[in-house]
Image (spheres, rainbow, N blue to C red):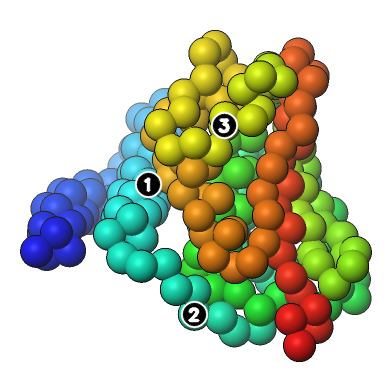
Amino acid sequence: MKSAVLDALAHDVKTPLTSIKASVSALLAQGSFGGKDRELLAVISDETDSLERIVNESIEIAQIQLLDLKPERRCYDVRQTVEAALCDLNPSSGGRLRAEIPEGLPPLSIDFRLIKLVLRQLVDNALKYSPEHFPVVISARERGGKITFFVKDRGAGIPAVDQRRVFRRHYRGGGSGNGALGMGMGLAIAKRIINAHGGDIGVTSVPGKGCMFYVSLPSANGRA
C-alpha cells in the first residue's frame, strides 16, 4: 500500500517537472531569446534537473526505508562507481569537485545503486557546506582487503560531541556545518546501507576546519 502511494506521488511530482523541462527546452531551441533572458531559461532548466534528481533520490530512499535492505551485489570498478556518483553533481559544482582515485584498485562487490546514493549524498553535503572557493575532494585507497572512500570539505565542521551522534536517524546539527543536513537521504540511511554491505562509515572533524567522512567497504577480493 505504501509503495503504491509512493509511486503515485512520484508520478504527480514528475509530470509537471517534465512539462517544465520540455517547455524550457523548446524556448531555448527557438533561438529567439538572448542575453539575460536566455541565461534565466538556462537556470530554470538546470534547477529543474536538480529538482528531478532530488525527487528520484527521495523516492528511492523512501522505498529503502519501507523494505528489508538486502543489497544486490555485483562487481564494480571503484573509479566507475565514483564517476557515477559525481555525474549529476558536476554541472552544478562550479568545477569544485576533485576525484583522486588511484589506478589498480580491486573491484567492489556492491549494490551499485545504493553505494552510488551514499557517495553522492556525502559529496552533495560537502558542496553545500563548503565555502564556494574551496574544492571538495573524494579519494579512495585500499588497505587490508577493504576500499575506503574519503570525502573532504572545508565547512564549519562538527563538534566532537556531535560526531558520535551524527548518524542517528533524527539528528540535526546546530549551526551551518555538515550536521545540518537539511533535505537528503541523511546519514542514518547511509549508515544502514553501508552496514548492510558489511562496511563502516564515520567522520573526523575539527570545528572551523571542515570534515572528512569515510566509507570503508570490503573489496571483491577481500570477500572471496
Dot 3: within a 10 Å radius of its alpha carbon, few (fewer than 14), some, or many (20 or more) residues?
Answer: many
Front residue of 224/6: it is 224
> Which residue: 34% across, 43% down?
51
> Which residue: 69% across, 71% down?
80
Image quadrant containing the N terminus:
bottom left
Give the residue number, with chain letter if any, for mark 3.
166
Q: Quadrant of residue 48?
A: top left
The mark closer to the camera, 3 or 2, is: 3
Dot 1: within a 10 Å radius of its alpha carbon, few (fewer than 14), some, or many (20 or more) residues?
Answer: some
Give the residue number, with chain letter if any, for mark 2.
72
Q: Is residue 119 visible?
A: yes
Dot 2: within a 10 Å radius of its alpha carbon, few (fewer than 14), some, or many (20 or more) residues?
Answer: few
Give the residue number, with chain letter if any, for mark 1.
54
Q: Position of 141 compared to 167: left or right?
A: right
Q: Secondary structure at mark 1?
A: helix
> Which residue: 77% across, 43% down?
137
Q: Residue furthest bottom?
A: 224
Q: Earlier in the sequence, mark 3 or mark 1?
A: 1
CA–CA distance between discs 1 and 2? Answer: 23 Å
